[in-house]
Amino acid sequence: MISERMKDLVAGSSAIRAMFEEGKRLSAIYGEENVFDFSLGNPNVEPPKRVKESIIEILSEESPNLIHGYMNNSGYDDVRETIAEFNSKKYNVQLSEKNIVMTCGAAGGLNIIFKSLMNVGDEVLVFAPFFGEYRAYTNNYDGVLKVVAPNKETFEPDLKEFEEKITAKTKIVIINSPNNPTGVVYSSETLTKIAEILNRKSVEFNTSIYLISDEPYREIAYDGIEIPYILKYYKNSFVGYSYSKSLSLPGERIGYIVANSEMDDFDTIMKALNVANRVLGFVNAPSLFQRVVARNLDSEVDVEVYKKNRDVLYNHLVSLGFSCVKPQGAFYLFPKSLIEDDKAFCDAAKEFNLLLVPGSAFGCPGYFRIAYCVSFEKIEKSLEAFTKLADKFKK
Amino acid sequence: MISERMKDLVAGSSAIRAMFEEGKRLSAIYGEENVFDFSLGNPNVEPPKRVKESIIEILSEESPNLIHGYMNNSGYDDVRETIAEFNSKKYNVQLSEKNIVMTCGAAGGLNIIFKSLMNVGDEVLVFAPFFGEYRAYTNNYDGVLKVVAPNKETFEPDLKEFEEKITAKTKIVIINSPNNPTGVVYSSETLTKIAEILNRKSVEFNTSIYLISDEPYREIAYDGIEIPYILKYYKNSFVGYSYSKSLSLPGERIGYIVANSEMDDFDTIMKALNVANRVLGFVNAPSLFQRVVARNLDSEVDVEVYKKNRDVLYNHLVSLGFSCVKPQGAFYLFPKSLIEDDKAFCDAAKEFNLLLVPGSAFGCPGYFRIAYCVSFEKIEKSLEAFTKLADKFKK
């Protein structure tokens, strides 16, 4: 009885569910501490202490009907103004509350942008490997997802293929940097080139092509690398931000969109985002956590914990002969599978209690993803399992 | 540049926005205390004290990564089990966590049901007057909204017209009791008849027709009236529940769906709801507030505050000659406009600083809605304005 459009999604979701069940099954046999579940991007690092403090402050300082009540569908004006000021200073841009819509995480943000912009058949361009949900979001609005293959040496986008795949129907391009699943950060040079291509193609087709930078991992970056701010590169740009990883609050569904004031049709688009938040049923981003994040703009999770995991696991995998780009951000590794069939490889890994996600799930077969947002103890214990896995496929 | 589908929605939303701006304009001239904004269903009664206490308890008792982390897209198992047990006892039904999906308010709940069930062109039947968002939700999934006219003496549904309007394409029927905007509660007799009609038509067309009872106002009921529980009347039934009004937490976006175990295709539908929560971008209901509501199942806002408002305002309006059904629940009055054109009537009301919503917004022209979830002081001060409004149209 479920809708035709849901049938494939439900079937696909059974695979994730099966992984989860497999984890539970293995834990029951071997003990939870001996099962290495690297399948989920659920942060293990605690939220900053300031988060809890600020919740308690808000509850004692502000009136309950303000804290928990309805507000403008785009979010509290004062919260949006605070975030705008913070970002204006941090990135040297000019933002006000007019540029900001508070959203139910980055997922909510992407959906309201898609709802606002997309007509049936419009194309969304993504760079492989990409977060699989982009496909579902595109389908929600009857769009067509087109995938640009990566340069597999660097996992930077193949800009030649990118330019070739842009058509008169291209409405949205998504970049995700630091990237899930590769951990790659796009350089200023790459963003400049992407902007040049989009400007050229917009003129050629006489269209507006909107670029969304999906940035849940912006604050999870290593070795002092700088992550360029898309608004400085391209006028038709949005940032989709989330506090899921930066404050370890993924369950709270809190984030925001920044829209570039220079974009085509800015005023109408901001109205549309406001309405889309309402009609899609989000109504508004959760109210208490809007006020919480406004008091935590300077708070940070301890990124060193992730970095230590990255370093130990990356070095071990390389020593085993795995080919892998060293991540500059996020909390994922994306090594090459030791056999062509990444699904068979991940199946084989279960023998060693390793739960890994095939690259196919990210539009990039032949690779696999390790989510290393787990305890360091777990990382250390898993090393032997990876060794055994490598041995199994040694020629 | 916005999508075709959004253009009407943005235009329509400008009317609401205009009302809001009018309120601000009048407040600036006459003072906020002299402007009677009855346009919004934003509860003025404070959340129960237990809500704040339980937030602080949770923060001190549970681990931050549990409180704020990802969980099953359907919600925490323990929270769902607690809600299932509570409802099983309260309504004498058999529920477990398998029947429950935690949602971002009732709006999120309705959207994930629609996404799960609706194919292009499927029909959604609603009873006028109805919450205008049902139309937007139906359009989100390319459905067709069909409206059943009310009996205007009682604002109970016209069941003859209801039966006539059911076709082989009817997938979903929505009831909303206590009703926004009339405050009417559907009787056990009415639900029995609705179920009979749906059973008869399902057999006739060999279809499954799903009935959703949208119940954000269940706990806002007066004079000891009992609100029947839909699961006891019809097998293909859902309850869409929200804590927005029952705990005065509308900004927190927290509610749940209950699905009847007896419904056609129950297992697949529950999987689909889980997936729909994810792919629509909700991902999950806000995590802290899932845990908060589980500790507040017995908590109640002070309904007497609303009742006092209802009684004073209802009696005054009736004394002025307005025709109006006495609300048994919710916090709205829906009187007959003194002239046929309800929009013109609401425009005229602004002269007396009264902000009212035309019945047309609820599919029922010739009437208007008063949201009396405002301070009692405001109600008292508004009486004279209503008197002047009635005088203006006295023949």
Image (cartoon, coloured by chain):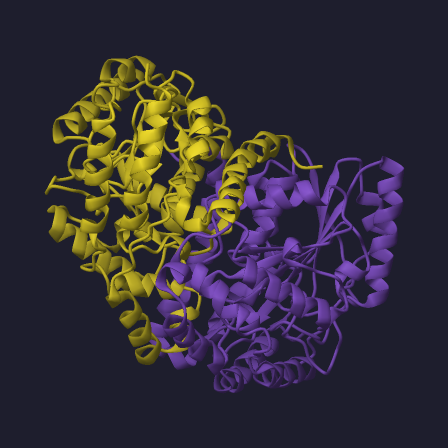
Chain colours: A yellow, B purple
| Picture quadrant of residue B329 | bottom right
| Picture quadrant of residue B21 | bottom left
Question: Residue at position x 85%, y 36% from top?
Answer: B205
Viewer-proximal residue among A105 and A389 = A389
Residue A145's place in the image compared with B234, above or below, is: above
Question: Residue at position x 71%, y 75% from top?
Answer: B328
Residue B26's place in the image compared with B388, above or below, is: above
Viewer-proximal residue among B182 and A138 = A138
Viewer-proximal residue among A51 and A22 = A22
Residue B332 seen in render: yes
Please indicate whether residue B146 sits to the left or right of residue A358 in the image: right
Quarter in which the C terminus of chain A is drawn: top left
Question: Residue at position x 15%, y 27% from top?
Answer: A192
x, y (%) of residue A73?
41, 56
x, y (%) of residue B225?
75, 78
Quarter in which the N terminus of chain A is drawn: top right
| Picture quadrant of residue A384 | top left
Residue B334 seen in render: no
Please indicate whether residue B375 sits to the left or right of residue A236 in the image: right
Residue A41's place in the image compared with A198, above or below, is: below
